[in-house]
Image: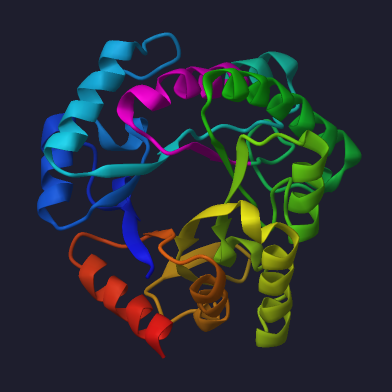
Amino acid sequence: MLQFGMRAHDFSGAKPAATFIKDISQAGIRHVQLAFEKSFSDIDVSTGRYSAGLGNYIAQLMNQHQLHCAVLGCYINPVVPDETLRQKEVAKFVERLRYAKHMGADMVGTETGRYSIDFVPTAATDSDECYKTLLKSFSEICTHAQSLGVVVGVEGVFDHTLSTPKKMKQFLDDLASPNIEVILDFANLISPSNTDADTQQKIAEQAFELYGDRISVLHIKDCVFDEAGVQKCVQPGTGLIHQQIVLNMVKQSKPYIIGLIEESTAERFASDCDFYTRLMNS
């Protein structure tokens, strides 16, 4: 039922686009999250360099090799506390929205950022000011997304602006845009202080109860936390994430959803898929 894919830049380092797409397809991967900057060595995708022709060129390569872009990644900090920088981040995202359809991407995705110039974790990310900045950025983004008919995928993370299912629900309600959907990365909602199975169960239940209908893509991974509380990804089944919890809910309510495995490798992708398939079938 679950359709597996991969975050493309985990497959290999950046290569010329034609080579990269051919190589990842020949490995049997069909669905990807694609971040141009991290995957293609021969294409300048800085703001202002896009065109419909570029989008169509990527689409032709993807179609030729039967590769589907489930998420077009756009790594921005939408709550950077500097107005000039914030506007640049929004402009970068909007430009990617403009050409997502040309290359057949289902959505353009991002996380929701930290309230710091250098993206370091800070308690200020939990402030009203930060949340208001997020709404300001995404109000602008949604205006363009709705006019273009493109979906925006938003991912919550335990130390970002949308750190809990309740905050994600508030964000969806406040924006009230049909063009916003959720990229659910269950591991990213687990903090160093809530790794026990009961708490993970509650977090998963909250996410599906509050906005299960808006979850359209999964990120799948396992992780541990180091002594400083920094998340470290590990091979599936060896970390702290109780994968069965969220996979049971996916099996019940989201058949055929695409699950993009993060922090996998070209060599390990097939066995990672087997691991998650066994959990789904158990």
Is residue 240 shown to the viewer in this render?
no
Residue that appears at 12% across and 36% down: 64
Please give left or right for residue 273 compared with residue 88 in the image.
Answer: left
Residue that appears at 28% across and 43% down: 68
Is residue 112 shown to the viewer in this render?
yes
Q: Which residues are magenta?
A: 89-111
Residue that appears at 37% across and 13% down: 50
Task: Give the x, y percent position of residue 205.
Answer: 70, 73
Please give left or right for residue 1 compared with residue 159 in the image.
Answer: left
Task: Give the x, y percent position of residue 125.
Answer: 78, 44
Does the magenta segment cover residue 106?
yes
Task: Give the x, y percent position of residue 55.
Answer: 30, 21
Please give left or right for residue 214 compared with residue 124 in the image.
Answer: left
User: Which residue appears farthest toward the right when viewing the image?
Assistant: 128
Does the magenta segment cover residue 8?
no
Position above or below: 150 against 273 = above
Residue that appears at 69% across and 20% down: 140
Predominant secondary structure, magenta span: helix
Which of the image's four quarters has the C terminus?
bottom left
Colouring convention used in this rendered image of the protein: rainbow
Which of the image's four quarters has the N terminus?
bottom left
Position above or below: 114 against 251 = above
